[in-house]
Image (spheres, coloured by chain):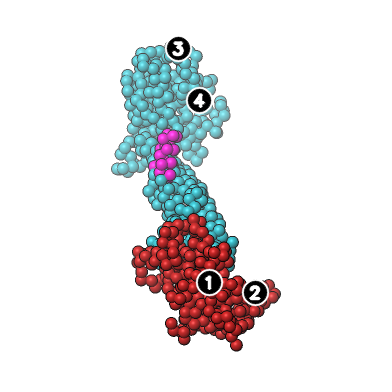
Chain colours: A cyan, B red
Amino acid sequence: MKPFKVIKIAWLALWKNKIRSLLTMLGIIIGVAAVIIMIAISAGTEATIQEQITGLGSNLIYVQGSFGRMAPGADSSGGGLVYDDAFAIADQINGVQGVVVEQSSTQTVKAGATSLEDVTIMGTTADFPSVRDMEIASGRYFSQQEIDRTTTIAVLGSSLAEELFGEEDPFGQTITVGTNVRLTVVGVFDEKGMVGDVDYDSRLYTPITIVLEKLVDNQFSRFLGDRVRLIYVEVDETVGTEGERTLDDVIYQISLLLAKRHEVSLDEPDFTITTQQDIITTQESTTAAFRSLLAWVAGVSLIVGGIGIMNIMLVSVTERTREIGIRQSVGATPNDIRWQFLTEALLLSLIGGLIGVAAGVTGAWIFGQASGMRTEIVVSSVLLAFGSAATVGVFFGFYPANQAAQLDPIDALRYE
Amino acid sequence: MNKNKAIINGRDLVKVYQMGEFEVRALDGASIQVQEGEFVAIMGPSGSGKSTLMNVLGCLMSPTSGEYILDGEDVSDLDKVELAQIRNQKLGFIFQSYNLLARTPALENVILPLFYDRTSLLTEEEQKEKAIKMLNAVGLEDRIYHEPQELSGGQQQRVSVARALVNDPVMVMADEPTGNLDSKSGAEIMDLLVSLHKKGVTIVMVTHDPAIAEYTDRTIHLLDGKVAREVINGKEKK
């Protein structure tokens, strides 16, 4: 029998039941669209993370204090990172290009009549713009001397500057942080955007000494030194690419130095050192897990769609028993009948798959526009989804088609 | 007309149905011969086995035992696929309830047997022409693209007659062809069958209506799965 004719017959049968065919396809449409959209979202997320990480440079080392072990006032030499550790690292370790210390505080910021609550005040150091890849848009950043002298100045993130001053030029203006810390604005950063979940543009940047002495000052700092949460170490570009010094060597030297300074053993350090690469790896495994979870969920919806097809095909076979009998009486063989119903199931899933691809691609785009999340259509996911839809059609169409093929012509003709 | 060529030669046909623990012998040794060009009626009360005989002769099922030679070919022991091909090549069916594909134009209904004909050398266009010719022959030239629900009972039965003839069968099986029709349409269908018979088409018709049976040359009466008697042109045989 001519394949074209079989497809035509199947198409006509589906066309006669347009609404039902459409509803049957809906399962496949949703399944295919779900696969494409979900993979597009996770691919978009991955790409965003990847870009941020490359944007930050892969030569960053994070030194974090482990505060867990230390009770305030217990052993003054035993806990956490202090401000001076950063300088020790910068001075004594080879291959270190820059060191940034950050200590933040959340405060209310006032400028004239404008008052903003819960602004993140980043106390940081001189290398911050280069390590964090931030550009000054107007004015200037602050120097090490200004940090040492606890100069009351601030550099604003772009969106913070706009919120506080609008069109007005913030340069030279005085703002009040918290209750009584008055800072003079000396510069505004260029727009940076979100990096991870951190909005660099909404922050206020000030010498770390301001934060340590005026905003998070506490009674223990006299004994402990000014405690900081995190030290960023930017390693020289050449480390790991040439010569004998590798990133691991640098990390080891930092560990030795800090252990010595804190008087702890290397087996039980009061700090942890993480590289950018560690973070990339963690992020990647998280997104990979996320992606495969999404793929499974979407796959399940495809199977549900397939079961929908099988269900409707079974109903259809019963409903069209008479038609099957008529076809058998004029000479249709079991195979002819089987092919007819299999083709119908296949057409349902292929057309459903095509509509699903269109819906998925559009849906991913709309989702991206609506949520602001980045979505990226992965060609292999489109092929995968479409291929699965076809497979599902054959698989779930086979049983009903077989039921139809095995009907006895006499019973089928007699069926009311 | 060659009266010597047998189209149907059935000997000792037996069909046993297993109904739970009971055996029903719907056909119990029926023997029947039909020559080429004959118009034969099969009559009998309900339960006499005439439907079963119709189904066996129409190759819709195989007999449990006995020999059935159709157009010189032994078809007593064929499988489903072979039976389907025999139906397609050698037989045409006219049913009481027309059995046309719903929501399908008359033309498509008539083409259907050609569609399943693997041996056909006709192109799609030629198949269409042939089907239209058949519809013309049954007087439906202006109803070619009408669907069954747009046609009267008599017209629908004409479509099924056209379908029964489109594959040039050696025999047409008619099962109560007038059963669902009013007497006027019924008479028209019978006139159509008689005119086909006069053109040489072999017709075997199952009916319970003696008035309808009178259109034929010969009436075979069944009783309890056996041939009870035969009436040829109004005269009792034997």
Q: Which residues are magenta?
A: A359-376
Above or below for B112 versus A164: below
Q: Give the chain of mark 1.
A: B
Residue that label 1 marks: B174
Above or below for B14 versus A45: below
Q: Give the chain of mark 3.
A: A
Q: Please state which amino acid type lies under the numbered disc 3.
A: Ala
Above or below for A166 versus B187: above
Please determine if labels 3 and 2 lie on a single subunit: no
* Residue A113 image label: 3
Q: Main secondary structure of the magenta part?
A: helix
Q: Please state which amino acid type lies under the numbered disc 2.
A: Pro
Please determine if labels 4 and 3 lie on a single subunit: yes
Residue that label 2 marks: B45
Residue that label 4 marks: A224
- Quarter of the picture containing the C terminus of chain A is bottom right
Residue B232 location, quadrant: bottom right
